[in-house]
Amino acid sequence: MAKIIDGKAIAAKIRAEISAEAARLKERGIVPGLAVVLVGEDPASKVYVSMKEKACADVGIFSDEYKLAAETSEEELLTLIDKLNNDPKIHGILVQLPLPKQINTERVLEAISPEKDADGFHPYNVGRLVIGKPLFQPCTPYGVMVMLKETGVDLTGKEVVVVGRSNIVGKPVAFMCLQQNATVTLCHSKTRDLAAKVGQADVVIAAVGVPEMIKGAWIKEGAVVIDVGVNRVGEKKLVGDVEYAAASERASAITPVPGGVGPMTITMLLQNTLESAKRGM
Ligand code: NDP
């Protein structure tokens, strides 16, 4: 049976380190600050924003929340971002997605100063990641890399198969693994014979959004499986993109859903804010 990679425990460890570091900074008069901007009433977004605020408070990061009406114009939002870009108390800015239709998401993300881009979505930061000189790394892939490190997985020379090529998970995590000297195959919906590709992987990273589409039988004996997927089935149940029970029989280590990658994402947002505050010293 595979070792379970406990995202909650790893997240708690990293958060304790962040908290200790924030306390050290405070002694020098620096309090890391994160601005969280929410436009509209999306219920899931509201939950994420309140989780982020609570996480900040728990580790001693100052958080400033801006709740804007659903009919806020792009110009109003850009004016707020400009203000936050110039606010010395703020080291990270996060605009909760999705944004209402009247607002051009790309334009908004590009208006955030690359030096305060806590989500790491600005094209400047994407470019820095690709050339192996990251400033801000996107939170979920950053969390995946920390989990691999904490599990003792050395990626050098390993075959990594990433399934999913989104800008927020699949593509960045592929480049991060490449930077760690893995040989990376990036798969997507047009990939032929996905089972064979997955079957070659020493490490499988699934970020698809389709419940249990990666079958346990595809997993190579002894592979490490990181399941980023979070899929709701029925009223309450959450499952990943990997057929967990069957994959656990073959993998050497695997992340559960929930309790795997999920708790790492907000943790890395805190880490990004802390790192930014330190860079600004
Ligand atoms: P997207 O919908 O943006 O991307 C999904 C990717 O999966 C696309 O590249 C798509 O390919 C590919 N894909 C879809 N169907 C198949 C298939 N049958 N075979 C192979 N590839 C396929 O999703 P995200 O990257 O935003 O999220 C992926 C999952 O991760 C979701 O379940 C999401 O909820 C979860 N997630 C979890 C987070 C966390 O904190 N734990 C954070 C972010 C996401 P193509 O490009 O060809 O369409």
Image (cartoon, rainbow, N blue to C red):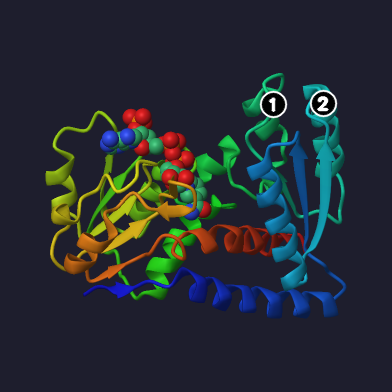
Is tag 2's residue or tag 1's residue first in the polypeptide sequence? Answer: 2
Numbered mark located on residue 100 in the image: 1
In the image, what residue type sits under mark 2? Thr
Whole-percent x and y of residue 131?
45, 45
Instruction: Name the quadrant containing residue 269.
Output: bottom right
Whole-percent x and y of residue 35?
78, 50
Whole-percent x and y of residue 161?
25, 50
Q: Quadrant of the N terminus?
A: bottom left
Residue 16 or residue 54, whichever sits in front? 54
CA–CA distance in space, label 2 to label 1: 9 Å
Residue 91 or residue 74, whichever sits in front? 74
Q: Judging from the image, what secondary structure is the residue with disc 2 in?
A: loop
Q: Is 115 positioned to the left or the right of 120 in the image?
A: right
Label 2 CB-ligand 1 distance < 8 A = no
Q: Which image quadrant shows ligand 1?
A: top left
Judge whether 76 appears above or below 6 on screen.
above
Circle 1 residues within 10 Å: few <14, some 14–19, many ≥20: some
Instruction: Name the quadrant containing residue 227.
Output: bottom left
- The residue positioned farthest toward the top in the image shown: 102
Could you tell me if the residues under marks 2 and 1 are in contact, i.e. CB atoms within 8 Å? yes
Residue 17 or residue 193, whichever sits in front? 193
> Label 2: which residue?
72
Q: Is 12 positioned to the left or the right of 163 in the image?
A: right
Circle 2 residues within 10 Å: few <14, some 14–19, many ≥20: some
